[in-house]
Image (tube, rainbow, N blue to C red):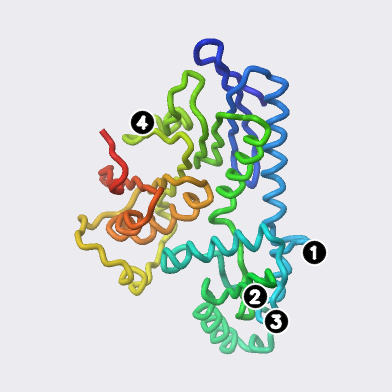
Amino acid sequence: MLAIKTISHNSIIFRRSVRLMGDQFEISIVGNNPSWAEDRFDDAVAEINRIEKLLSAFGEDSCINEINRNAGIKPVKANAEIFRLIDRSLQISALTHGAFDITYYTADKDNSNFDTVQNSNTAVKAGVSNVNYKSVELNAIEQTVFLKETGMRIGFASNSKGYAADRAKYILQLQGVSSGVINAGGDLLTWGAQPDNEPWTIATADPSQEKQSFANIAISNMAVATSVNNEKYVTIIDKKLLGSFTPKKGFPVSKIKSVSIISTTAELADAMATPVLAIGINAGLYLINQLNQIGAVIIDDHDRVYTSKNININ
């Protein structure tokens, strides 16, 4: 469905809302030709669908499926795009000390270790303890990916939407779209400016967030991903993980209500939001403050707002 919104001086924002990758995407572009806008929306949707298929673990022709199928057996040659995405994901895992991790464990029911319940429990515990991002071996020369442990799998649920949004933006820019917003289920990616030449803010990019205390932050040419604490989901935090962060100053102990990460790419923002939610206010802000071109806004369960050092909220 195409929606048209006039701002000023006959400038127009064209919008299309469509369900993709199991979530609601709203694509907004600035232009003056409805037919041209429709074609650009088709280009963006086609690219997002391509990314969904590329990262799927289903289908015999799936590269991810082949990598997973050969876990503990042999390296698999990956196409360049998937190889680079895995490489970046492992770098984020190292950066967050494993709080972000594309690996997981699936018990192999055909394995002889699963003949008895006792053996099964032992094998699962051993497998889970061994499986993490450090068990993924990349060979840049051969462009191969090897999952060292049998039963290991990789998946991109945590950063696939962000990567798809980045790719859609790239395609739209190639087609001459100089300004727009991609709202991927509440995660935002913007470029250019609004039709009145004002920068995009969180509120203008996603009106549903306009009542947030930080909604006036300018995010033109940036991405914002938000992770919300779900009370039904219990996160178990490894004490060793928290021990790897050594912030000098502490904050009052409190639960995190939400984390919004602002970065130059949607892929990075998407990947970092949940790890910061998991490690807490103190360690999360300490981590973000060590990095360039990335910021964080954290709201606790008392609606107190904490920001990284490069974000100012009036």
Q: Position of residue 77 (x, y in %)?
A: 72, 70
The residue mark sitting in front, 1 or 3, is 3
Q: Which mark is residue 216?
A: 4
Q: CA distance from mark 1 to mark 4?
A: 47 Å
Q: Specify the label residue 73 is tagged with.
A: 3
Q: Residues within 10 Å of mark 2 (few under 14, many from 20)?
A: many
Of residue 31 and residue 113, the one placed in the foreground of this image is 31
Question: Which three-letter amino acid code belongs to the residue tagged 4?
Answer: Asn
Measuring from the top left, give residue 13's x and y in whole percent: 57, 22
Q: Nearer the viewer, mark 3 or mark 2?
A: 2
The residue positioned 62% from the left and 30% from the top of the image is: 177
Sequence-first disc among 4 and 3: 3
Check the image and name the residue furthest to the top.
Answer: 9
User: Type of residue at label 3?
Assistant: Ile
Most distant residue in the right direction = 60
Contact check, label 3 and label 2, Cβ < 8 Å = no
Q: Nearer the viewer, residue 123 or 139?
A: 139
Label at residue 146: 2
The amino acid beneath tag 2 is Phe
State how far apart marks 2 and 4 are (Cα). 45 Å
Q: Secondary structure at mark 4?
A: loop
Where is residue 148, by image quadrant?
bottom right
At x 58%, y 49%, the residue is: 163
Q: Earlier in the sequence, mark 1 or mark 3?
A: 1
Marked residue nearer the N-terminal end (1 or 2)? 1
